[in-house]
Image (cartoon, rainbow, N blue to C red):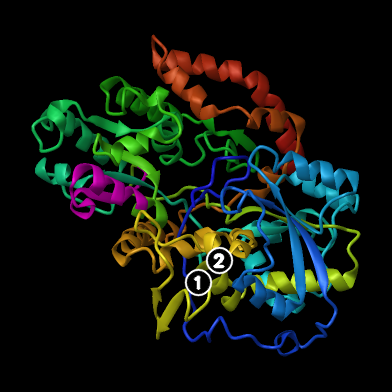
Amino acid sequence: MKRKKKESRCVMCLLLTGALLIPGLGSCSKKEPAAKIFDDDMSQRHHFTFAMLNWGQLNKSTPDYNSDDVARIFEEKLNFDWDIIQTTWADWIEKPRIWINSGDMPDMMFVNFNFKDIQSWMEQDLVKRLPDNWKTRYPNITNVYERTVVGPALEKAIPGNAAFLPNVVFFNMPTRPNLVSHFALFFRKDWAKALGFEVKDQYTLKEFTGMIEKFQAQGASLPGAGGGRVDTWNLDTRRVAETFLLYQWADSGVGQNQKFYKDSSGKYVWGADDPQVLPLLQNMKDAINKGIVSRNFASFSNEEQDDLFFAGQAFGAFTGGWSEFVYRSYNRFQDITGLDPFECIQEATLTDAEGDYKPYEELNFFAGIVFNPKMDDAKFDRLLKFLDFVVSDEGQNLARMGIEGKDYTRNGDAITITRAKGDGGNFEEIYNIYPFTGNLSHLLICADNFSSQSPAIPQKYRDAVDTMYATKQKIGVDTGMVKNFNFDLYFFDGPNYLKFNAINIGDEMIRVATMDGDLKTNYERWLRDMHVMVDPVLKELNDAFGN
């Protein structure tokens, strides 16, 4: 499922790939006594309240989340029931803040990540900290926590036991040890071949824009090109800044948490000041002026530029490369054009000018959960046992596929989905069959993790995504080119820094690139104007972290 873009994004994410299915699991429908599973007394029943974000996976009529067959399996193992309080995209950030600060919160809440909030709540004991032995008592939670990257970083930043459990996007990371973005080039390889270009898994910006220039000059007569009416490279303003600046040099000053970096002297500097940014900006200006970038780039919104590409109306795009999106988009392309997407579309990696892939790593989490500090320890232990089971192999297969033998069958490593299909011919969402599972969709392990190994998505779609990640692993992660995330900046709360970080530098650079007059003169004037805000930020950063 594609989440809407809000404050805490998984770089969906970032997102969708990784394997969940572990060979050799027994039947998920087998109901064992709880004592044999956890070696603890489960005789006391507990009732939990859970505030969960509803992005479409929860029935708004509030069904009984305790009565379906998957719910009964969980309840028989853990002897609990729960009430679900739904939050929405409109209130999921502010409403939990109000509940927490008033001291009147549910037992467990799905919350946005904001470092200052988390730090304040923990210092005031407004959320419950995990027990001293939690990493050994709840090993499945620990495995998830370590993979988020942000979890261990928080432990260093805030003294004491953890109180915020981030939800991992990819439990099985598609690239290791650094997670990279799933965004990729998509282009019409049938047209590229007809124009004499080699179809590859990676391209420099110069190679790709050269391909588009030849398409502009000679592509009007190609089948489906509409006599020259088809667009060129469909990018919105954000993707223009990313492809021409951020992916060419990660420290160019465009990234949300990457506007500043330490130079060789150990001092923080602003990336936009570096002389190598101006040539990148000139390339962007030229591409905009020549129409290599769609002339509609400034008006595109809500990913309509991607929709047009997958409707056969553009040569290229730069968009999400995760399995579920590729599957849905390729099918849409085939429905609209009548063409085989695997004969017509290539997914590839955009590199820098040297053919390297060296962005900053992606954070591997989306939001997280916190707990009511008034909860007694016995109830808290049961709730953590529940979470530990949710992220176990058995718990994840129940959450993603339902009940073995009823909703899917297993023959060795091969999985066959047997649940009903909807009107569109796709399998019914598991949370529509078992409402209980909607609350598990992004609980400690996001649904994104399951996508590339989902038997509901044919292998050839997953192979295309795997190739994209394998390329980035080879030319970025394995070579040490991918940069480690800077948590000093991510957690920093200097007032000048926070104010400046809210500025969209990518939009600012596009504005400069599209001004009349000499680019160098305009850019240098813009830099001088920006330093009224930049200089106080640099002082804050270097006072805190310099050398």
Determine whether, in the image, residue 248 is placed left or right of residue 381: left
Mark positioned earlier in the residue sequence (1 or 2): 1
Which residue corresponds to mark 1? 20
Rendered view: 194 above or below 169: above
**Which quadrant of the figure contains the C terminus?**
top right
Quick one: 249 or 254, which is closer to the camera?
254
Give how far across and how far down residue 88 sits, in percent. Answer: 65, 43
- Picture quadrant where residue 425 is located: bottom left
Residue 171, label in figure? 2
Residue type at the position of mark 2: Phe
Residue 64, label in figure? none
Is residue 131 visible in this depiction of the protein? Answer: no
Proximity of marks 1 and 2: CB atoms separated by less than 8 Å: yes
Magenta stretch contains residue 507 = no
- Picture quadrant where residue 371 is located: bottom right
Quick one: 226 or 527, which is closer to the camera?
226
Give the foreground label among 1 and 2: 1
> Bounds of the magenta span?
328-352
Label 1 element class = loop
